[in-house]
Image (tube, rainbow, N blue to C red):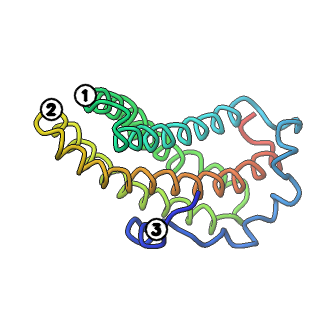
Amino acid sequence: MIFDQALAERFNIRQNNMPDEMRLLLRDYPRDSWEAHPGFKQATQNWLGAHQMFRRLGDITRTNTERFLSKSSAADEFAAELSYYGNIMVGNLHGHHHFEDHSYFPELSAADRRFDVGLEILEKDHQSLNAVLEQFIETSNRVIMLSKLDEKQAYEEAGGLHQVAIAIEAFLDRHLGDEEDLAVPIILHHRLRG
């Protein structure tokens, strides 16, 4: 995902790669080998499936906003879609990250403390993403309300929403990829979640 530096700084999107030492097990368990590994169980597949859902919801939010900005969708249609998909995205991201911070990451840490630095980076990402999601909620609510009161103002506000949607998509692209590259090799190496 390509995004502008100012947007990354505004929303505190981590741009540096995971430290090389956090990718140690990824060399032994590359992505293209995960599905064939006997330790790749349903719980891990479900976790990765949730990540795919978040990527898709980020894409839907951005593209729906672009359709509205290009006047390819009506304000009421856009508001309904924004409310529906936005609620799913925000609610599920908060729940997913709560589970990771309080259950999943401690389990990974207990299995292999060498990767605690990477897990701490991911937890900080969750905190930063919460701030982006709060901005998304605030801006979305304004757009939804304005869509009923003043379509022209809703359209103007949607430009800011588009920037937040791009930020969410960029954030998820960076964060989820790093999270998967760190967690799945630990799971496979230590035969967790089976």
Residue designated by label 3:
8
| Callout 2 secondary element | helix
| Callout 1 secondary element | helix
Estimate the x, y position of residue 83 in percent, counting from the top left: 31, 32
Crowd around label 1: few <14 · some 14–19 · many ≥20 (10 Å): some
Q: What residue sits 50% from the left and 41% below the top? A: 96
Kindly give the residue lying farthest to the left in the view shown. 149
| Callout 3 secondary element | helix
Residue designated by label 1:
76
Choose top left, top right, bottom left or bottom right for residue 26.
Answer: bottom right
Q: What residue sits 71% from the left and 37% below the top? A: 193
Q: Which amino acid type is shown beneath numbered disc 2?
A: Lys
- Horizontally, residue 126 falls left or right of residue 122, namely left
Crowd around label 2: few <14 · some 14–19 · many ≥20 (10 Å): few
Q: Are marks 2 and 1 in contact (CB under 8 Å)?
A: yes
Q: Reading the chain from its start, which is encountered first: label 3 or label 1?
A: 3
Question: Which quadrant of the figure contains the N terminus?
Answer: bottom right
Choose top left, top right, bottom left or bottom right for residue 175.
Answer: bottom right
Residue designated by label 2:
148
The CA distance from mark 3 to mark 1 is: 30 Å
In front of the other: 155 or 33: 155
Q: Reading the chain from its start, which is encountered first: label 3 or label 2?
A: 3
Q: Which amino acid type is shown beneath numbered disc 1?
A: Asp
Estimate the x, y position of residue 130 in percent, counting from the top left: 38, 54
In front of the other: 180 or 83: 83
The CA distance from mark 3 to mark 2 is: 32 Å
The CA distance from mark 2 to mark 1 is: 7 Å
Q: Up-down: is 15 above or below 129?
A: below
Q: What residue sits 80% from the left and 42% below the top? A: 191
